[in-house]
Amino acid sequence: MTKQEKIRVIEEMMELGEGTLEEGTVLKDLEEWNSLAKLSLIAILDEQFGRKISADEIKALKTVQDILQYME
Amino acid sequence: MIDAFDVSGKNILITGATSGIGKAAALELSKAGARLALISRNREKLDTTLQELHGFSHTVYSFDLKDIAGIENLLKLIISERGAFDGFVHCAGAMQMRPIQQNTFGFIHDMMLINFYAFMELARVISKKNNHSERASFIGISSVMSKKGEKSLSAYCASKGAMDSAIRALAKELVMKNIRINGITPGYVKTRMLDEYVELAGQDEFEKNVLTNQYLGLGDPIDIAHAIQFLLSDASSFITGTSLIVDGGYLS
């Protein structure tokens, strides 16, 4: 999966239009980065990327790039 | 004097017996003199739990209840070793939070396997002739979530609601065999499952949603264990087809 495709996954997760997010987008500036989005991220990382992420690690996420690091 | 709450000598199966409510039930029932067969996935935890029990007539079985097709053979083995059951308590369960877009068929199915299908299979097999005693009592551990919804918990809520509905129907069938079947509806209880929920839902959300409604505070697994003992005993012999609410006031 390319970086752009991964960003698209994140956009879909928050039901954002294509091209809304960039690597540097700050998560806390997004209204859609709410508790449901965070739960969705846990499920997506687990099912699509085989990665577990803890609540503390989610709290530490600042930008889209931080999420991408879990999508390796 | 005959103690209606007496469960001594009863041969009881407990699933999910190595943590939370299941473990508390095992400890309390063993103190009360029941003879227990414990099922859990984790062999080491089973051995540890076994050592903590009172009395010596208990046995443990390492088994993943998601293997629904294997449950009957496991129960045959247990019954051949221990005799017919006086009751079972299905404490094994899974709770995972997922918003609707992640609520896939596979995820829901996994939740139903352990929370509902395994319960139905236990009831099916143990209610067969010679697998249960004269006046057996079956118990499923439900949740306040079967009666009140919560964000991201639709699969869990549905699995517990399915159990509650099935219990009402099964009670009418199983009365022919003198078997009573009931659920217990716990509120929020101090378990590892609760810790995971608070971690994901957030402390603020937890305090707002839970602690304000559950005005007796958080429950202890032993509170639920006492309800289990009651439903297994003759003290509850006029109770079937219902779910006993033990929720610190949450649903009131």
Image (cartoon, rainbow, N blue to C red):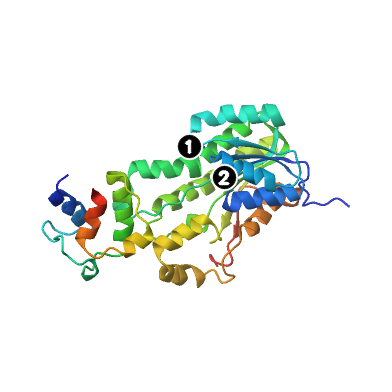
Q: Going by the image, does B133 lie left or right of B113?
A: right
N-terminal of the two: label 1 or label 2?
Answer: 2
The numbered disc on residue B16 is 2
Could you tell me which chain the residue with mark 2 belongs to? Answer: B
Residue B167: x %, y % from top left: 57, 45
In the rendered image, the vertical position of residue B89 relative to residue A58, given as above or below: above
Report crowding for label 2: few under 14, some 14 to 19, many 20 or more residues within 10 A (C-alpha): many
**As rendered, which of B61 and B45 lies closer to the eye?**
B45
Distance from the alpha carbon under mark 1 to that under mark 2 = 12 Å
Q: Looking at the image, which residue is at 19% across and 56% down?
A: A11
- Image quadrant occupied by the C terminus of chain B: bottom right
Residue B52: x %, y % from top left: 68, 48
In the rendered image, the vertical position of residue B35 relative to residue B195, given as above or below: above
**As rendered, which of B178 and B153 lies closer to the eye?**
B153
Q: Looking at the image, which residue is at 42% across and 71% down?
A: B204
In the rendered image, the vertical position of residue A10 relative to residue B173, given as above or below: below
Give the residue pinned by disc 1: B66
Residue type marked 1: Lys
Q: Looking at the image, which residue is at 57% across and 53% down?
A: B20
Residue B157: x %, y % from top left: 45, 53
Choose top left, top right, bottom left or bottom right for residue B218.
bottom right
Residue type marked 2: Gly
Residue B43: x %, y % from top left: 57, 39
Could you tell me which chain the residue with mark 1 belongs to? Answer: B
Q: Looking at the image, which residue is at 65% across and 57% down?
A: B222
Choose top left, top right, bottom left or bottom right for residue A22.
bottom left
The numbered disc on residue B150 is none
- In what element is the residue under mark 2? loop
